[in-house]
Image (cartoon, rainbow, N blue to C red):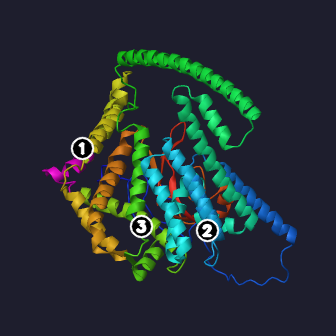
Amino acid sequence: MSRHHPHPYRNYVCREGHGWHGNHGDYRSHGGYGSHRGYGSHGGSRNYVYPLGPRRETIVNDRDNNLTKLFRIFASIPRWNGYPYLFIMVCNADYQPDNKDSKVVDELEEIRMSIDKINQYSGASPQMFKLIKETLDDYQNLRVNHNQKQMEQLVEKVGFELRPHSVKDHTKFLEQLRNLTVEQRSVLREICINRLRSFSEFAEYIISYSKDNRVQQFSEELETARNISIEQRYDESRQSSRQIENSCSQISNISNETAKLLEENKRLKLEAARHQAALGNVVNFKWRDDDPNNSMQLVKDIEKLQRDLQSFTRVKGTNIQINQVAVSELFNRYKCSTKFDDKAMKVVLSAVLQRFILEHINELSDDFSRRIDNTSFLTDDQLEAGIASRAQALFPLISRFSTFNPGDDEHTRVLPIKLRQHIYAALSNRGFDNQNHQLVQQILESLIKKMDQYRTIESKDKSKLASKATSIIKQVLKIFCFRLETQEPTPKVEFYNVGDPIDVEVMDGSWQGDDAKDLEVEICSFPAILLIDSEKRILTKAQVMTRPKV
């Protein structure tokens, strides 16, 4: 936040062009990138004319390979709530306004019955159950009424819900479904229905077993529903009972082993605590598990900031107007090859705005710190910057003291690290909590004006913007100015440049499998945060938009 205090992005390494630079915290703007996730092409015509069509066996092989990939996705869904959304996507691949939807309506009703059963047996939260039921009802009504625009919005919503279920790019996924035959899509719909039916039966099974040893009653009800013969019901009931007995035995063994491990863990913690107390907690640079500055909690807070930025920078919706001239200039500033009329423009714009917000907050906070460097009297709103500045002046003095006065005690050796950790822990815990903090208010006013240059939101939705923006500003200041400084070693913040190859180890985006080798960075909306120590750990990956390699 000042000349002496490390820049909020002090450890950022920019590989080429301009951006934030390393140890001195010099901030500049950074270039951006092209089309998002391989949507469309940039250059060249799509109206190719081939002298001969592809061989039939090639088409069949491609379609089979496509089906195999889709089956893998369907088979990898770990929870039941992914299958209603998958069913909608498969149905939508067959959707035509003139189609008769009686079969789809029947299938939707069967899915509702399975979901009702899962909910009945406590297999779903009320919020999840309500959301999925409303989505299914909306989809059925839209198919009947043939409202194409609202159908597209619903599919967009379904695609968003499928992201946690291995479907990162619903547009590409929908295209894969459309490349299947009608029979293959019918099989996928049946898979969704059968999987939901299995989940509902399993939910009923679990509840029945847990109440008054009603295993036999559950087995008989399940067998009756499946029209199994008397002999088969008897055999399956015995087999089910044996499996349950085995499972109970295994659970009992695991519980006993867990109890032993917990007791051993408790003993080891007490022993470690005694040793640590004997050492005076001198060389331990890690935070307790329940401390807000623990690295795991830091990762959770960084991920929350990423989600809040995505929500704040949304540009989709009828109540949002986009300024074409300003947005085009913003794309040019970040060297994005995305054009205003590209299909992926809004997705890329949201990512660019996230990058812009981080840079703008950093620029204003750095300017605020520079203006108080030579001030002897600090107002209450200048305390955070003043403490950080004076702490940065103190650390090298302590290091010089340790070198000039040699010794073998641990206290002097670790003093600069301990001071840094605890000073910045105090700043991160209480900094900027004043509701009308001068720096926060300055950044808020500037940020709202800047955002209005690129998008216009109807007045009824503007009331929420200031509250969201204030929260984001405080999160950015606390995390990048203070929280990172509580870690040992201090993490490095790294943005990636336009045209950089995709590195799945340090980047996160929308690609599947080996697709990453054919992509490059379009815009890095959020930096990677890395711990450069013996383990080279990654706190959070960089968030990137991609484009096909040129």
Query: Does any portion of residue 26 appear in the rendered image?
Result: yes
Side of 415 relative to 540 (left or right): left
Side of 4 relative to 341 (left or right): left
Q: What residue is shown at x 58% (from left), y 23% (from top)?
A: 251
**Residue type, label 1:** Arg
Question: Depth-wise, is mark 2 or mark 1 nearer the camera?
Answer: 2
- Figure check: 302 above or below 329: above
Label 1 element class: helix
Q: Which residues are magenta?
A: 371-388
On the image, numbered disc 3 is attached to which residue? 314
**Residue type, label 2:** Asn
On the image, numbered disc 1 is attached to which residue? 430
Label 3 element class: loop
Which of the numbered marks, if any, corresponds to residue 92? 2
Label 2 element class: helix
Q: Are marks 2 and 1 in contact (CB under 8 Å)?
A: no
Q: Nearer the viewer, residue 346 or 10?
A: 346
**Residue type, label 3:** Arg
Side of 72 relative to 541 (left or right): right
Side of 427 relative to 200 (left or right): left
- Measure the C-alpha gap from mark 2 to mark 3: 25 Å
